[in-house]
Amino acid sequence: MALRKLLCVALFVIASASLAPGGTANEAPSVVLKFYLQQQFGVNELGMVPAARSPVQGTNTGFGQEVVYEFTVTTGKSPQSKVLGYVRGTAIVVNNTAASTTFFVQNVIHYDNGNVRGTLSQQGESIFSSVPWEYAITGGTGVFRNAYGFNVGRFISSTPTPNGNLITTYYEASVFLDR
């Protein structure tokens, strides 16, 4: 009897999930946002929580370290290119080995290209030494209200600056909107 009840619940969950709104493998995103993120480390980030464990030899970050940041979104590789907005969020080291460091990232993209304006919430885990990395888009405001999708990023360059390091990354956010 318990097995039968369990099977009924499982079938209900499967049927409910198949009726849920969402993109299909063949559905094109409503909009694809392409932008560069100018990450000025040493200026626009702040260590909030110290590492719970010391960095592994050969790494710079310890497990549990948390950083809050605000970086600029631009149309081009150059930090002097047109500004589209900014990204604010947090990154927490959730695993580190000599081979790589894994971050849990949660942030909000504030985007305004003159025609499209709003925010996108995204989150996910990243190993920045492995490209590309991907985040889930889990909501938004403005024209992105109730958005979902994914944002794929890759490393472009790292340039030493007087205050730290400017890391430039490129993103393509595939955004689905319920209309």
Image (cartoon, rainbow, N blue to C red):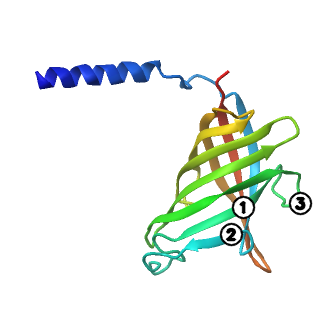
Query: What kind of element bears circle 3?
Result: loop
Question: What's the CA distance linking mark 2 and mark 3?
Answer: 20 Å
Disc nearer the start of the sequence (3/1): 1
Q: Residue at x 70, y 48 (%)?
A: 109
Q: Say which residue label 1 marks.
A: 70
Query: What kind of element bears circle 2?
Result: strand
* Residue 97 horizontal side relative to residue 158, left or right: left
- In the displayed structure, 123 sits above or below 78; it is above
Question: What's the CA distance linking mark 2 and mark 1?
Answer: 6 Å
- Residue 118 image offset from top left, x and y in percent: 76, 40
Query: What kind of element bears circle 1?
Result: strand
Q: Residue at x 49, y 79 (%)?
A: 58
- Residue 46 image offset from top left, x and y in percent: 66, 72
Disc nearer the start of the sequence (2/3): 2
* Residue 56 horizontal side relative to residue 43, left or right: left
> Is the residue under label 1 in contact with that under label 3 (CB below 8 Å)?
no
Q: Say which residue label 3 marks.
A: 80
Q: Nearer the viewer, mark 3 or mark 1?
A: 1
Q: Say which residue label 2 marks.
A: 45
Among the 4 quarters of the image, the one containing residue 174: top right
Q: Quadrant of the C terminus?
A: top right
Question: What's the CA distance linking mark 3 and mark 1?
Answer: 17 Å
Q: Quadrant of the N terminus?
A: top left
- Residue 128 image offset from top left, x and y in percent: 57, 60
Q: Residue at x 48, y 22 (%)?
A: 20
